[in-house]
């Protein structure tokens, strides 16, 4: 079976191959720091050997819990935010039929999301939709105290118990949280929910291969064994002893850091299949929270092409030359549609007749790559043989490993996120949360 592969050829007019290769020693030091646990944030390295340490029993436990939800729920709400939601959504949206929600016949529960915003309209509309439905909830929070998620869960728990009765609710609510601390743990223990633990040493944005990602993905009907198998494959392919030139995580980390050094401050992740939209969102959190600190870090952005070629395309082609692109390309689509011939040919598209739609998409991709490189945008290319669990698993681990190395190349701690606390502190002060009396006074004085 093939692997995902990385091609950096189209960055080499902007940076030199020698400059990329010159990172070899630094990358080795970074990888060793990860594997030996000697670098910054070394208490958060549980993700590193996670794929190969997932047991069959653990997967079976997840699958049987998923089956209980599948059997007892027509809708499952995944409550979580950031790392406690994006990985699951990335896989479920990438692998689901784009119109699954509109189809009468369902293969499993409808998967919807909550706890990732504080919009009153969203919460109203969600709870309204759930009225009279046999729904369940997967409540995901590592800290167990995240406001967005806790607020949504308070409402969903009550509604589930009111509609389905306490006993059934107990069967249809699962908590994924810390082993001991946090409000989500306290509630789950008190109510007797089935729970899964998020290991202490796995940060939210690296947690997709823990129950955080695996349970919702299994509930949605996707193959978590294959997802993990793909990640295991990349764990090997990006391993410590794989030579620099053959290690995709090493090359990606080195190339993006060299591009950054050369003035390219923004990395735009690109897809040509909108189903990958949430894979990009997952990647944005991974790199944004890992590298954006100490007043440095590449800004991770993302676009869906060709859609956004008709909006952001102008900026990318001719705006400030501070960007580079990383394209995720799917070699073979899962479905086949051929452009039909039309006798009148009023739209002038007969030159495409007989071609697969993907051939048109691929020429859009190639034409864009050439145009953007001509326009001063270095281009990296990640090729994914097919869109399935196995290759998404590969992609996840590849990006995670590269992120750890890349953060060390940049000189930051890739495993903390102190900056996200600033808004929370202010919000709590403004809401007069008990314990924030001093902050409340101080912030009121500034208004
Ligand atoms: O899982 P939780 O503790 O609820 O955290 C959910 C998310 O929110 C936090 O503010 C962090 O910025 C993220 O890294 C985390 O993934």
Image (cartoon, helix red, strand yellow):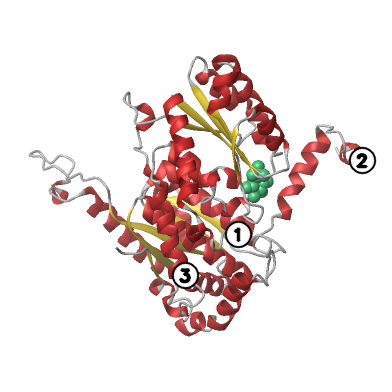
Give the mark, 3 or 2, whose residue is nearer the N terminus. Answer: 3
Q: In this view, does 396 lie above or below 424?
A: below
For marks 3 and 1, give the one nearer the viewer: 1
Number of marks: 3
Farthest left residue in view: 343
In-front residue for pair 96/11: 96
In-front residue for pair 417/188: 188
As helix, strand or loop, the secondary structure at mark 2 comes to: helix
Within-10-Å neighbours for mark 1: few <14, some 14–19, many 20+: some
Q: In this view, does 140 lie above or below 22?
A: above
Percent position of residue 300, x then y: 55, 57
On the image, numbered disc 1 is attached to which residue? 46
Q: Is 3 positioned to the left or the right of 68 in the image? A: left
Q: Which residue is drawn at 63% across and 59% down?
A: 290
Q: Which mark is residue 438?
A: 2
Residue placed under numbered mark 3 in the picture: 238
**Of marks 3 and 2, the one in the foreground:** 3
Depth order, front residue of 104/73: 73
């Amino acid at each position: 079976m093939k692997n995902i592969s990385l091609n950096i050829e189209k960055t080499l007019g902007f940076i030199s191959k020698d400059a990329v290769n010159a990172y070899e020693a630094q990358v080795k030091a970074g990888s060793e720091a990860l594997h030996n646990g000697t670098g910054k944030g070394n208490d958060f390295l549980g993700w590193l050997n996670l794929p190969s340490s997932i047991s069959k029993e653990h997967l079976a436990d997840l699958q049987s819990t998923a089956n209980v939800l599948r059997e007892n729920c027509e809708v499952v709400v995944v409550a979580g935010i950031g790392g406690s939601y994006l990985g699951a959504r990335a896989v479920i949206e990438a692998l689901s039929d784009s119109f699954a929600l509109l189809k009468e016949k369902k293969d499993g529960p409808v998967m919807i999301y909550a706890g990732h915003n504080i919009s009153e309209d969203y919460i109203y509309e969600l709870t309204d939709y759930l009225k009279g439905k046999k729904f369940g909830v997967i409540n995901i929070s590592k800290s167990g105290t995240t406001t967005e998620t806790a607020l949504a869960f308070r409402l969903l728990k009550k509604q589930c118990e009111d509609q389905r009765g306490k006993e059934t609710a107990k069967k249809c609510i699962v908590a994924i949280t810390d082993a001991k601390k946090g409000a989500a743990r306290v509630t789950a223990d008190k109510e007797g929910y089935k729970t899964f633990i998020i290991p202490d040493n796995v940060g939210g944005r690296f947690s997709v291969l823990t129950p955080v990602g695996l349970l919702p993905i299994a509930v949605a009907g996707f193959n978590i064994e294959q997802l993990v198998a793909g990640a295991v494959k990349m764990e090997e392919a990006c391993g410590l002893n794989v030579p620099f030139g053959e290690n995709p995580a090493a090359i990606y980390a080195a190339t993006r850091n060299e591009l950054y050094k050369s003035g390219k401050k923004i990395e735009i992740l690109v897809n040509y299949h909108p189903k990958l939209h949430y894979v990009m969102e997952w990647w944005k959190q991974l790199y944004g929270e890992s590298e954006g600190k100490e007043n440095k870090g590449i800004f991770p952005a993302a676009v869906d092409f060709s859609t956004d070629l008709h909006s952001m395309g102008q900026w990318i082609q001719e705006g400030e030359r501070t960007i580079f692109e990383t394209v995720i390309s799917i070699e073979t689509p899962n479905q086949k549609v051929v452009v039909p011939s039309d006798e009148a040919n009023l739209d002038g598209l007969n030159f495409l007749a007989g071609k697969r739609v993907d051939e048109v998409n691929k020429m859009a991709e190639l034409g864009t790559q050439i145009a953007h490189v001509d326009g001063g945008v270095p281009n990296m290319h990640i090729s994914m043989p097919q869109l399935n669990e196995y290759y998404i698993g590969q992609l996840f681990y590849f990006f995670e490993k590269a992120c750890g190395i890349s953060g060390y190349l940049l000189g930051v701690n890739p495993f903390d996120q102190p900056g996200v606390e600033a808004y929370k502190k202010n919000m709590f002060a403004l809401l007069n949360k008990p314990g924030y009396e001093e902050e409340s006074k101080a912030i009121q004085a500034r208004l």
